[in-house]
Structure formats: C-alpha cells, structure tokens
DNA sequence: TTTATTTCGTAACTATGAGTACGATAGATG
DNA sequence: CATCTATCGTACTCATAGTTACGAAATAAA
C-alpha cells in the first residue's frame, strides 16, 4: 500500500485547471490546433509540469477526452438509459443537442465529433480511446432501440445496428451544423424530421 | 493580347500531375496533414516549382478543391439538375454516395466534407472557397427541392432551406461513416431511411 | 542542520514544414 | 556565338511545436 508521502517539494500544478482549460480549448478551437505551449500560457503551468502530469501530448488529449465524456456526453447516455418512452427520449435528444451553447457558456459543436473527424491525426492512445467511445455510444443507442422495439414503441424494420448508426449520424450532423453557424431552431427541425423516420 | 512567348527556359513542371497528386493526398490522408514537401517527393517537383505555380500552400489547397469539385462533385450537381422524378433523384444520390470507392480506385470519404470540418485550419483563400462551395451545394439542393415541390412530388411541409440542410447533412454523415469503415450497403440503408422522410 | 526526496521551471534540443535567395540552366533571338 | 529571358532546383531561413536535461527550490525525516 502506498501511504500519502509528504516528502519532497509540494506539487503546485493544478491538474484539474489544466485539464478543464485543455478541454475547452480543444473543444472551442480544435484538438489538433492547440499546442501544449498554448495551454501553458493559459494556465500558467510550465511545459515540464504538464509533461510530468500527463506524459505527452497524446496523454493530455486522452485525459481531455475522458474529461469531456463525463462532462458533456453523460447527458446523452442518461437520456438513452432513462426509463421513458421512445418518443420522450427522442424529444430529449433533440433538446439536449440543440441547447443554446452561448447561454451555457460552452463552445458549440462537439469535441468527440471533432476528434472522430481527425482520428488519424491524433496520438495512438487518444485514437484508440476515440474508437472505444464511439463503440460505447453505438452500443448505448442499440440497447435503447432494442428496448423500444421490445416495448412495441418502435416497429421499424430497420436493423438495430443500422438504426444506431443512423441516430449517431444525425447527432454528428447536428454538431457540425452548429459549428457552421446554423440556428439551433433549424437544427432541431432537421433532427425532428430525421428522428420521426424511425418509429 | 499575350502571345505565347517561347522565350526562356521551357517549363517542365507538370501542373496537372501535381494537382492530381495533391487532390488524392488531401482526399486520402487529410488536407491539413499533407505537406508541400510530401507532394514534392511524390511528384518529383521542386518546392520552388510548386510555389511558382500555386503561390502558396493555401493556393495549392484552393486549386485542389477546385479540381476536386469538377472531379468528384460534378455528379452530385448533375443528379440534382437532371430532369427526373424526385424519387429517381434520391435513388441516384444514394447510389452515387455509396459507390464502391475501392473498385473506382478512389479514396473513401469526401475531401470537401473534410475541408469543411477543418475550415478554420485552412488558409483564407481556401476557407472562403469552402464557404462558397457549401453555399453552392445548398443552393443546388434548394432548387431541386423547390422544383419537386412545384411538381407535386414532394409534399413535405419542411421549409426548403431546412430540407437542403437535411440532405446535405445526410450526405456528410454518409461520407464520415464511409471514412470510419462502415459498409456501403449499411450506409445506403441509412440514406434510404433518411431520404424517405422527405416526400 | 543536514540529508533524502520530490517537484519546479528555464533553457535548451529536435523535427518538421512553410517559404525564398540565388546561381545554374535551357531555349529563343539577333 | 552572344545575349536576353524565364524556369529550374539546391540549400538555405524562419517559425512552431513536441520533448527533455538539469540545476534550483521546498518540504519531511534523521
């Protein structure tokens, strides 16, 4: 067992602050266009400090994705797993996706969607985590759809795995539109049409 | 009028070869992860040669996008403008989008979609051209949808501009799925469901 | 206090990539 | 053959970004 050694110089690097700053920068700008040096400037941390904490650029991006997941992706999983009607869930998905980001003080678009688009430019650890998260999301959609089918709320003859890809694609499209500046109300209309298809 | 001056050392740089190579690399790899130096190695051209011909990295990407448009986007415009039923056009869109790229000897995904995703990392000239092309595509969808509505082949009450965004988003989603390795048959199913919505 | 231990951060190093200075080269013209 | 002209390509410059070497600093234990 490792006891809390109080030896040595006390750590001053604020891991959470660095991580949150990184998430916001990657999210707002782009995961491949924010350098370690930029994060240093914004947080006051030193480069070796960040390397000691996260190991590498890849490590920081990986940690940022993990952080983003429990910060911004949690509501998605929650909607899919909550016990509610298929219709109610679809409505909740539209509402969640088209929230007013400005009002929430959060960037538009989706860091996960951005990382997927640049998957091959990311480090190997981050790349693998992107793949895993993608599969997790698809699995969550599948469980949800399968449940709706067995409850008789979804009679569509579309295969469940294809339907999962369908919903995931709609969500990704919405995030891209948002980043391109399309009004949330318009995006919501698009999503409602898309989601009405599967019932 | 400028007459064809035969003075000076003859040009040896093969503009078309460089351009096609650039298009294929940007398309296959990513527009922001292919350096001028890489294009040089692949084509045998020298760096100053490429700069003399295209002015800058931005200029080359811009020319590549233009080339891509008349190479790979032309069929899309053609389908939308051809005189055929709304249904026939939608079927043609699905077929075009889910062509077997391997068999055609062409990369999967779409360079234009990739450039849109990285719009802010591109040079100003390329960025503006991406914007213009996006608007062109949306306009083409709108003209098509408007025509279908007036022919009575599309009775959907969805606003035309929103419907255009809808179709554009579906196409983009298909291209991303293709790049992520989803089977074309599956993508076609997704698209058919999505397109069936608007009628 | 001295020593052991741990973190701190300046100042490098290295690699890559955009962009260019400039002398060499190749053909037309006279 | 001499000159004019336009392109060629080697070998730079310059900037950025990931990464690290290493001595200074801070705290607990002896």
Image (cartoon, coloured by chain):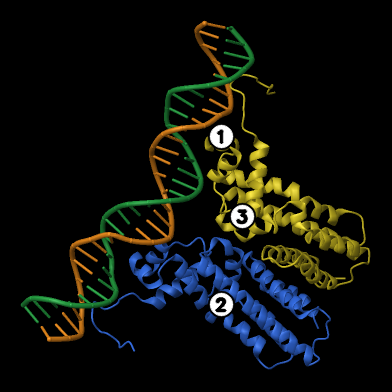
Chain colours: A yellow, B blue, C orange, D green
Q: Tell me, yes or no, if residue B46 can be seen here.
A: no
Of marks 2 and 1, the one in the foreground: 1
| Labelled disc at residue A72 | none
Chain ID at mark 2: B
Query: Neighbour class for label 2 at 10 Å: few (<14), some, many (≥20)?
Result: few
Tell me residue B28's x, y (percent): 53, 67
Chain ID at mark 1: A
Q: Nearer the viewer, residue B176 or A29?
A: A29
Dots 1, 3 in contact, CB < 8 A: no
**On screen, A62 above or below A158?**
above
| Residues at marks 1 and 3, CA–CA distance in whole angstroms | 23 Å
Of marks 1 and 3, the one in the foreground: 3
Circle 3 — which element? loop
Query: Neighbour class for label 3 at 10 Å: few (<14), some, many (≥20)?
Result: some
Tell me residue A30's x, y (percent): 61, 55
Residue projecting furthest to the front: B1
Query: Neighbour class for label 1 at 10 Å: few (<14), some, many (≥20)?
Result: some
Quarter of the image where the N terminus of chain B is located? bottom left
Residue assigned mark 2: B103
Q: Are marks 2 and 1 on the same chain?
A: no
| Labelled disc at residue A49 | 1
Circle 1 — which element? helix
Q: Nearer the viewer, residue C14 or A187?
A: A187
Give the residue displayed 50% in from the left and 60% down from the top.
B33
Q: Nearer the viewer, residue A95 or B185?
A: A95
| Residues at marks 2 and 3, CA–CA distance in whole angstroms | 37 Å
Residue assigned mark 3: A29
Dots 2, 3 in contact, CB < 8 A: no
Q: Tell me, yes or no, if residue B24 can be seen here.
A: yes
| Residues at marks 2 and 1, CA–CA distance in whole angstroms | 50 Å
Is A183 positioned to the left or the right of A144 in the image? Answer: left
Quarter of the image where the C terminus of chain B is located? bottom right
């Amino acid at each position: 067992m490792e006891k809390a050694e109080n030896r040595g110089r006390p750590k001053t690097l604020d891991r959470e602050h660095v991580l949150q700053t990184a998430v916001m920068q990657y999210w707002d700008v782009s995961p491949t266009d924010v350098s370690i040096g930029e994060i240093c400037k914004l947080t006051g941390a030193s480069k070796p400090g960040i390397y000691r904490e996260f190991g590498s650029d890849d490590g920081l991006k990986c940690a940022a994705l993990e952080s983003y997941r429990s910060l911004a992706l949690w509501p998605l999983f929650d909607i899919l797993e909550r016990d509610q009607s298929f219709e109610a869930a679809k409505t909740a998905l539209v509402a969640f996706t088209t929230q007013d980001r400005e009002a929430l003080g959060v960037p538009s678009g989706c860091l996960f969607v951005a990382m997927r688009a640049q998957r091959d430019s990311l480090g190997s650890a981050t790349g693998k985590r992107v793949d895993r998260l993608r599969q997790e999301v698809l699995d969550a959609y599948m469980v949800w759809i399968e449940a709706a089918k067995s409850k008789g709320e979804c009679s569509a003859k579309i295969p469940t795995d294809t339907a999962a890809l369908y919903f995931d694609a709609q969500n990704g499209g919405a995030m891209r539109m948002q980043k391109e500046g399309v009004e949330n109300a318009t995006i919501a209309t698009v999503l409602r049409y898309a989601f009405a298809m599967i019932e």
